[in-house]
Image (cartoon, coloured by chain):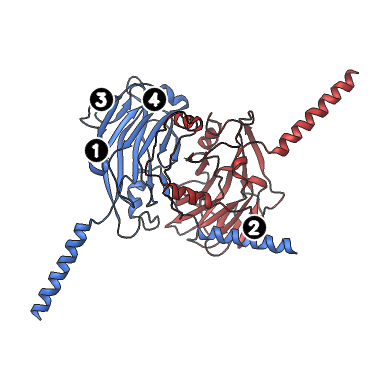
Amino acid sequence: MIHSSTSFRLYEYGSTEWSRSQGAASPNEVINPTGPCGPRISRVAKRVGSSPAEKGTGMQLHSLAMLGTVGLLAGSSWAGVVSTVACTTLAEWNEFAAEPGVFPAGWTTATTSESFESKRPLTQASISGGLGWSSWTASASAGDVTQEFGAMSTATVGTTLFFNFGGKPAVLGGLHGIGGDFGFIDESGEYQPGRIEITLSNGAAVVQEFTAKTSFAGFWVTDPEVTITGLSLKPLASMYAVSTSNLYFGFAGVPAPGACALLGIASVFASGRRRTSNQ
Amino acid sequence: MKNFAFATIAACSLIASANAGYSSEVIAFSDLTEWQNAPTDADINLFGAGYSAEYYTENFKGLANGMSVSGGADWAAWTATVSAGSLQTTGTGLYATQAGATVTMNFTADYQMPMGGVRGIGGGFQFVNAQGQAVAGKIWLKLSTGESIFRTISSANQFMGFWVADPNQTITSFKIQPMGTGAAFFVGAETMYLGTAVIPAPGAVALLGAAGLIGGASRRRTV
């Protein structure tokens, strides 16, 4: 863990304090004067590179929300804006992404999901899937991972299930939301309830009892500088293998320059066609 | 070939880093029993060896109303403030008197690092209408460490809480912010639970050492 003696200030994004910090007009309220800067730096340092992605997975793009003007993010100091939000239902997780002011102006959010329901049975050290910002690699703390019975699980009881995600440059955005339907499966593939400690790559965690196949837990990381690079599912005193039947991915960020360029080209073509048809 | 080798190394390092696991620094709970048991749960392993939890329960009885309300003692001393209006204690809870106002709970005691200070908070949070009846609404419970819970409170008080496992952090404040339709009601807490990690005091350690020395000397004399 990296430690620092630097004074550290936490601002809620969009708050008066945060606005002042951007304008630096007056002294800001120091919410946490003791400054646990070190742990936060270590969280950022925990980011890892891209993971190999398996092409052609059956993903569905559910929604694209909050498409606004591109913010002038370059040069802004985002240091100290830290927030991780835990949600216990999928509806809350979806609603949170649509809350105004949660992400910087101009950021787009989108969600997609990965279902393990129709996947071919597979057991190996790691299994990958997804595309781009929602690409994932599953592995276990010991032994293999198994893709069977409509779920991704560890092959060995009592081991922790990990998901690593393909990271993106933080300022441009990336994976800021993750959730899933979690629980346990027995040898015959039946769902079993139980307690799981779910930890994000930035150290935020929940301990929750999962009672049904659709029991949900999820997070959003609203700090623009921190993307989610991994998730661990640690079983708490269970006789069964920890599993997930669905994963939900949330993107937040500025539209990629390539997408902007494509939009520009499309508008040039459209205006060109209009001129031609007018003549 | 070279690219393939790099890709293999990258994939291996990725899996290796995943297998190292993530350490939970701040843990959210949605069940009171789970929250209370967490410090002694060997699987969660919240605090380091030698530490144990101490609890303080606040039911807001006998406190004066006002824009700022204080209570607790020692490590659990707190001061509540509100973004608009004032705070009202009902005998069983603490509520904002203005609909949509955010309640902030500050922990004012000096604390020692590592450990000590307020390390766990929880509460039965809810909304009430003008008649004082519990109503449904959304709450965003925000911790000073940056972690938060976004939850729909269906009716009567529902538990939400946190423990901070990171020894270099404590909870210095938390906010109860009404969201969505919840902004039409008065937010508050029926009961607040606080927790800390108890460190053996140096005096107690010295006493134990002295007792050991005296015991050893008396044994030697007997022999």
Q: Nearer the viewer, residue B173 or B188?
A: B173
In the rendered view, tell whether residue A159 sits above or below residue A169.
Answer: below
Give the x, y percent position of residue A195: 44, 51
Q: Is residue B57 left or right of residue A208?
A: left
In the rendered view, tell whether residue A82 sits above or below residue A158.
Answer: above
Hey, which residue is sitting farthest top in the picture?
A278
Q: Amino acid at mark 1?
A: Gly
Residue tagged by mark 4? B101
Q: From mark 3 to mark 4, how far is it between C-alphas?
A: 16 Å
Give the x, y percent position of residue A115: 62, 47
Secondary structure at numbered mark 2: loop
Tell me which chain the residue with mark 1 is part of. Answer: B
Badge 3 and badge 1 both on one subunit? yes
The label number, if any, that marks residue A121 in the structure image: 2
Q: Earlier in the sequence, mark 3 or mark 1?
A: 3
Q: Earlier in the sequence, mark 3 or mark 4?
A: 3
Residue mark closest to the camera, 1 vs 2: 1
